Image (tube, rainbow, N blue to C red):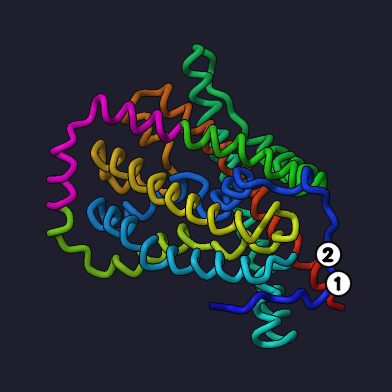
Amino acid sequence: MLAPHRETHPSVVQLSPERRLNLLALISLIFFTTCGGAFGLEPLVGAVGPGWAVMLIIITPLAWSFPAALMAAELTTLMPEEGGYYIWVREALGSFCAVQQAWWTMTISVVWLAMSPALFVSYFTFFATSIARLVGAPDLSISVIRWPLAVLFIASGVALNLRGAREVGRSTKVSSYIVLASFVLLVLVWLKVGPMPSVVDFIRRDLASSHKGALLLGLSYIIYNTSGWENASTYADEVDEPRHNYPRALAVALLVMILCYLLPVIAGVSTTSDPAVWNSDAGRPVIAQRIGGRWLGSLLAGAGLISTMGLFNAQLLYVSRLPVVLACDG
């Protein structure tokens, strides 16, 4: 049992209880920090095949994410301070290592944050084209507004984050409801039209085949998509009752992530395992379209738009707390 931690400096933020993040908001933020829906897993199936993809989705969260979530729950409960893992490293290894941890996280976040506007424009293209076809309008070309659309996306995320953690939490709660409801509908449509026994046989046959050299590539995809559990710790001083809510939120988010990855992938591979479909270019909307038609593809493209906004806002929230704490530490 670890001893209670005494704060080494005064609280960085002073918020009333009603301005703090509640349990549902924290679950939603962790969901978008670590997952955000089954978007981004498409290259995994294309790389290793459906059988190994399903096995990696089952095994990796238990072997990789579960220990990381336990660590994050334990240390955030022990030290519920603004800065999260920066504080953990500082207490264990000193200021130099802590600054390196924070600095490299902020550096790589430039790459992570840049992915969201690009994905948003990609899903918007599919969504706008599908809607135009549904209503009988000519295909819309948005090539001239790709950059303005990306800039508008970034500006809206910055504006929301400037309003505070509570507003970001409220936004991600709504986003998580929409994204999860879309995947639930996809699975329900698949259950109505998909033959369950053939899925098991199909995956078993694929596991028996050879995917030489693809396992490491598959691990890189799945580990990237199941990491980040410690990142939600950086705004611990803005969470209501963090010692109680962090363990609960991490447990719920882990379970939701596993189901959100596993069921849509099983539904998708029962329809097609073509690597030309299971890639980042075609993506989840094309797979959903094959399961339920154009309307379902449009719905998942819309959910992709919402998901990229949630990912961007959640990542911007946690990384923006690091320079503040660095400044407070001098």
110 to the left or right of 275: right
Asked where in the image residue 199 lies, by quadrant, the reply is top left
Q: Position of residue 200 (x, y in %)?
A: 16, 45
Count of picture labels:
2
Q: Tell me what residue is drawn at x 62 percent, y 66 percent.
A: 77
Q: Position of residue 301 (x, y in %)?
A: 50, 33
43 to the left or right of 193: right
Mark found first going from the N terminus, 2 or 1: 2
Q: Is residue 158 visible?
A: no
- The amino acid beneath tag 1 is Cys
Q: Tell me what residue is drawn at x 65 percent, y 63 percent.
A: 233
Reading the image, the residue beneath label 2 is: 12
- Label 2, label 1: how many angstroms apart (C-alpha)? 8 Å
* Above or below: residue 34 compared with residue 150: below
Q: Nearer the viewer, mark 2 or mark 1?
A: 2
252 in the magenta segment? no
Q: Local crowd at mark 1 within 10 Å, few (<14), some, or many (≥20)?
A: few
Label at residue 328: 1
Q: Which residues are magenta?
A: 182-205
Q: Position of residue 45 (x, y in %)?
A: 32, 52
Camera-side residue of 320 and 62: 62
Q: Is residue 65 visible?
A: yes
Asked where in the image residue 93 lies, by quadrant, the reply is bottom right
184 in the magenta segment? yes
Q: Tell me what residue is drawn at x 39 percent, y 35 percent.
A: 286
Element type where label 2 sits in the image = loop
